[in-house]
Image: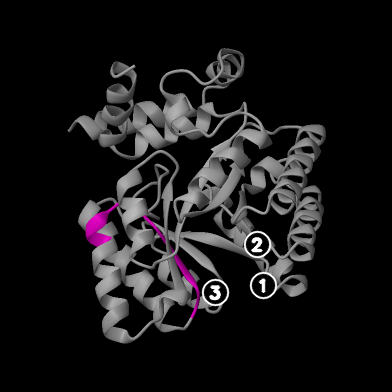
Amino acid sequence: MVSMVLKPMFLYLSKNKVLNRGAKRWGLKMGAKQVIAGVTINDAMIAVRELNDKGLVATVDHVGEFITTREEALESADYCLQTLKAISDTGVKCNLSLKLTQLGLDVERELCYQNMRKIVGKAEELGNFVRIDMEDSAHCQQTLDLLNELREEFPHSVGTVIQAYLYRASQDVTDLQGVNLRLVKGAYKEPSQIAIQDKKEIDDNYLAIIKQHLLSGSYTAIATHDHMIIDKVKTFCAEEGIPKTQFEFQMLYGFRKELQETIAKEGYTMRVYVPYGTDWYGYYMRRLAERPQNVSFVLRGLLSK
């Protein structure tokens, strides 16, 4: 009942432009420092190095919201290029994650595409990989269309995310056989016409598309904090003879640290999603919206200081 009230509230707050502008001035407040690596590229690299030292790999995201101009999109693209260079220069084990709306998708499609060509081209040049984060359903098909265009030129350097709560998820996974996919349950509020609403049904579909992608021989990133799902994936892969090199687990920076380290010690690839940047507010609100446990986590962190 609590989560039914909190989720819409935090999702609403995540879209509040006034609060977002204020958050840039406040700095990392409201417990955000626990789940945001910092505001600069150097902050992110330090956080990734610390994770690497514990046997974890990472993907970094220069978080951003409300890109409405060509100039903002170009600035965001430049940050992505700088981040790829910093990863190469520091030698950390790390990929890049990004959102197409940050790169101008809602401003001009061609602008976004050209920004992405530069970024994925640089990643390929440096031997790295770019993950296109999936956004709300309004951007889903646009994201997949752009992904397919980019893969014609860079077939191994770019992938995306599929959200299990969308009814289209299984067909998308079929269409993207052979693509490096991150599979998630889904974090946005979507209508019942296009998305599963029942938690158990979402969990069941999530596990189903994980198995589907793994059995196709495709590289699969399982992004969840749900230890029961993780255990089921481990068992399934052992039974089917799927090697640990064909998949990885992913979790968010600042959450379930002990479990992350345990998974890595068991010989699995454990990748941590590391957000950084001054535009942290929207990302942070969505994390609070996902699960009521996240709210209690933040409150415990604040009270312990």
Residue nearest the viewer, comparing 147 with 268: 268
- Circle 2: residue type: Phe
Question: Which comes before the other along the chain, label 2 or label 1?
Answer: 2
Taking the spot 72% from the left edge, 54% from the top edge, the residue there is 88
Taking the spot 42% from the left edge, 19% from the top edge, the residue there is 30
Q: Which mark is residue 172?
A: none
Q: In the rendered structure, are the residues bearing label 3 and label 2 in contact, judged by CB atoms less than 8 Å apart? A: no
Q: Quadrant of the N terminus?
A: top left
Q: CA distance from mark 3 to mark 2?
A: 17 Å
Q: Which mark is residue 156?
A: 1
The residue labelled by disc 2 is 129
- Circle 1: residue type: His
- Circle 3: residue type: Leu
Q: Nearer the viewer, mark 3 or mark 1?
A: 1
Taking the spot 71% from the left edge, 45% from the top edge, the residue there is 83
- How many labels were placed on the picture? 3
Taking the spot 79% from the left edge, 41% from the top edge, the residue there is 78
Q: In the visual, does 194 lie left or right of 227?
A: right
Q: Which mark is residue 176?
A: 3
